[in-house]
């Protein structure tokens, strides 16, 4: 079976979507005969060099990279060019199904389906159909996606969801559509050596709404004075310096290190030294129903127990008191209590670490592609 996967991201980049789609493609190459990966070209040299230098991976020969120039930074031009290439591949009998994660490509997907009777699927990473449950109403760009979802989802072969709460939300609006749950994956499961582990680690954006401030407030409240904290994130030097000043002002600079964005090798190095991972998401519509944070899967794959905001989307993955524990979103005092409790019980952390690694083994990118393959085979 041959699949084409259409993404609008610039490849490579620091975007989480590029991390997701690249490892998804590597997993798909283990399952499908050929996997055509459409992206906007953002590199010189060869794709093989990008896989090696940016992802520390070898590109499989059956993973066919389809890089297109980002002309005028226009998705419309990009979509027309992709659709033309897909049409040619379909005519040659080289494709059995199409998948996109961008709602802007849905009209092209449906057109190809109607023209060639090829199964087409939407891998959704959000929910644009209705904004009534959100704190902020949709902007013009999001309203466009709302119209596209409402118009084209009923005509798709199927929809691929990342989270059970997300899938249940879509089912409410599209009861006649077919859905499959294919969670975010892990590339490999790393061994856990507790002799090396000491850090409380946060991975992700340093934007205030991501909850990094809650982590720092909690660290100030923790009874443990030997707590060492890693903040792995920071888009540029100015942002890192902003948070470093906050650390100095709060007398935390000796206990907290902000690394900035780091490559996969350094990330793995730090995760192998992490005792406990934290996911301090704020309580919002997106975080309740839609988020599938890559950091969670990074933690699990390294056998790291998780302290996470108590939200349905995170409970969908984390088994309470087995792979992690929960705290009240936005409550640093509650987070500090959980940190102190877990750091004082090394045996529980070791047990939870073993459960985390076992859970990660159930969530590989290869197994994700097997789920999608079986779903496609129904059509």
Image (spheres, rainbow, N blue to C red):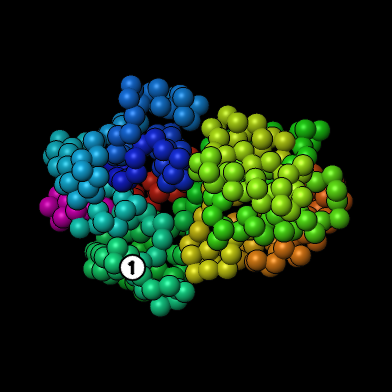
- With respect to residue 118, does 261 lie above or below? above
Q: Is residue 115 magenta?
A: yes
Q: Quadrant of residue 143?
A: bottom left
Q: Is residue 254 magenta?
A: no
**Quarter holding the N terminus?**
top left
Give the residue number, with chain letter if any, for mark 1: 139
Residue at 36% across, 70% down: 138
* 271 sits left or right of 137 in the view: right
> Magenta part mainly helix, strand or loop?
helix
Residue at 54% across, 46% down: 239
* 43 sits left or right of 16 in the view: left
- With respect to residue 10, does 322 lie above or below? below
- The secondary element bearing badge 1 is classed as loop
**Mark 1 packing: few (<14 Cα in 10 Å), some, or many (20+)?**
few
Q: For the magenta stretch, what is the residue range?
A: 108-120
Residue 192 in picture, x, y percent from top left: 72, 35
Residue 348 in picture, x, y percent from top left: 82, 50
Residue 18 in picture, x, y percent from top left: 42, 41
**Quarter holding the C terminus?**
bottom left
Residue at 62% across, 38% down: 259
- Residue 72 in sight here: yes
- With respect to residue 54, does 376 lie above or below? below
Residue 288 in picture, x, y percent from top left: 54, 67
Number of numbered labels in the structure image = 1
């Amino acid at each position: 079976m041959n699949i084409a996967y259409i993404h609008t991201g610039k490849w490579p980049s620091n975007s989480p979507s590029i991390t997701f789609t690249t490892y998804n493609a590597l997993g798909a190459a283990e399952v499908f005969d050929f996997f055509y990966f459409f992206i906007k070209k953002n590199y010189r040299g060869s794709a093989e060099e990008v896989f090696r230098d940016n992802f520390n991976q070898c590109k499989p020969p059956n993973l066919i990279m389809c890089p297109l120039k980002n002309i005028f930074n226009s998705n419309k031009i990009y979509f027309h060019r992709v659709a033309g290439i897909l049409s040619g591949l379909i005519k040659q009998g080289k494709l059995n199904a199409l998948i996109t994660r961008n709602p802007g490509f849905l009209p092209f997907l449906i057109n190809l389906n109607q023209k060639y009777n090829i199964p087409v699927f939407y891998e959704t990473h959000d929910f644009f159909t209705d904004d009534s449950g959100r704190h902020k109403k949709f902007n013009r760009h999001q309203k466009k996606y709302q119209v596209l979802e409402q118009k084209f989802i009923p005509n798709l072969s199927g929809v691929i969801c990342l989270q059970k709460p997300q899938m249940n939300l879509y089912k409410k609006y599209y009861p006649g559509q077919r859905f499959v749950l294919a969670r975010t994956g892990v590339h490999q499961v790393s061994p856990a050596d507790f002799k090396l582990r000491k850090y409380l680690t946060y991975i992700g954006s340093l934007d205030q709404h991501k909850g990094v401030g809650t982590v720092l407030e909690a660290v100030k409240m923790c009874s443990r004075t030997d707590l060492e904290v890693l903040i792995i994130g920071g888009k540029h030097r100015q942002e890192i310096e902003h948070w470093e000043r906050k650390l100095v002002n709060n007398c935390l600079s000796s206990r907290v290190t902000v690394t900035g964005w780091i490559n996969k090798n350094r990330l793995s190095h730090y995760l192998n030294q992490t005792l406990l991972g934290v996911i301090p998401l704020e309580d919002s519509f997106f975080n309740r129903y839609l988020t599938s944070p890559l950091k969670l899967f990074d933690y699990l794959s390294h056998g790291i127990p998780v302290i996470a905001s108590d939200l349905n989307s995170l409970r969908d993955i984390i088994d309470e008191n087995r792979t992690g524990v929960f705290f009240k979103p936005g409550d640093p005092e509650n987070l500090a209590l959980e940190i102190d409790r877990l750091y004082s019980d090394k045996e529980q952390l070791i047990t939870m670490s073993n459960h985390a690694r076992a859970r990660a083994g159930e969530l590989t990118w290869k197994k994700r592609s097997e789920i999608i393959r079986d779903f496609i085979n129904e059509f």
